[in-house]
Amino acid sequence: MSKAFTKEDSGSSPEEEIPEGEPLAKNAKNYLTPPGFAKLQAELHQLLHEERPKITATVAWAASNGDRSENADYLYGKKRLREIDRKIRFLSQRLEHSEVVDPLRAQKKDQVFFGATVTLEDEKGMQKTYSIVGIDEANPSLGKISWISPLAKALLKSRQGDLVTLRSPKGDQELEVIKIAYIEIL
């Protein structure tokens, strides 16, 4: 049989797998705003204390029914438990390496740093507002950009009135920093 059709061990252990999100460099800080940290904690708590016990009970019930090879409840339950356990490891690792940064306690409010909410104006006069947040809480459609995104990197350490250049596949774009605020990011 061809090697293309055989399953080989990739050599990585389940602990090394990261199910979603951007990977962190080993021992790197995972910067989060207080609401972002609380959201990750709530998700971990829900998985550990609600979802996992419920699936475990279903698997135990299905296993007591006998033949497990054709028992859909058992097979699906075991698969779902593996997914939940992988997500629990992921969230635990993220929370363990987290550093919570409260934008309301920013020292230098005249420069753009993590937690800043920045209003920008592009070359066409269009204004947009972005909040610089952690990678686990980024949502560009809501104006929340990751601190490691190209736009955030271009903005870091800039001041009101500064022109910054955003380099993108569409070409360079000049943006003016109109306003910097350190407010609660929801």
Image: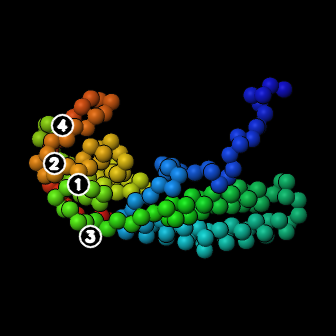
Query: Taking 98 as reference, is 7 above or below it?
Result: above
Q: Residue at x 55, y 72 (%)?
A: 45
- Residue 102, image x, y percentages: 32, 68
Whether the residues at callouts 2 and 4 have beta carbons within 8 Å, the answer is: no
Disc 3 and disc 2 in contact, CB within 8 angstroms: no
Compute the Cα span from label 3 to label 4.
30 Å
Amino acid of disc 2: Val
Are discs 3 and 4 less than 8 Å apart at CB? no
User: Which secondary structure, mark 3?
Assistant: helix
The one nearer the camera, 127 or 106, is 106
Which residue reaches farthest right?
66
- Which badge, 1 or 3, is on the more N-terminal residue? 3
Q: Earlier in the sequence, mark 4 or mark 1?
A: 1
Residue 88 location in percent, x, y?
59, 63
Badge 2 marks a residue whose secondary structure is strand
The residue to which callout 3 is attached is 105
Q: How far, Cα to Cα, is label 1 from label 3? A: 14 Å
* Mark toward the start of the polypeptide (3 vs 4): 3
The label shown at residue 132 is none
Residue, disc 2: 177
Q: What's the amino acid at mark 3?
A: Arg
Can you see residue 142?
Answer: no
Q: What is the secondary structure assignment of the residue under circle 4?
A: strand
Residue drawn at (76%, 56%) of the image: 75
Reading the image, the residue beneath label 1 is: 112
Residue 44 seen in the current view: yes
Q: Which residue carries the number 4 mark?
A: 174
Return the x and y of residue 68 as percentages of the image width and height. 85, 58
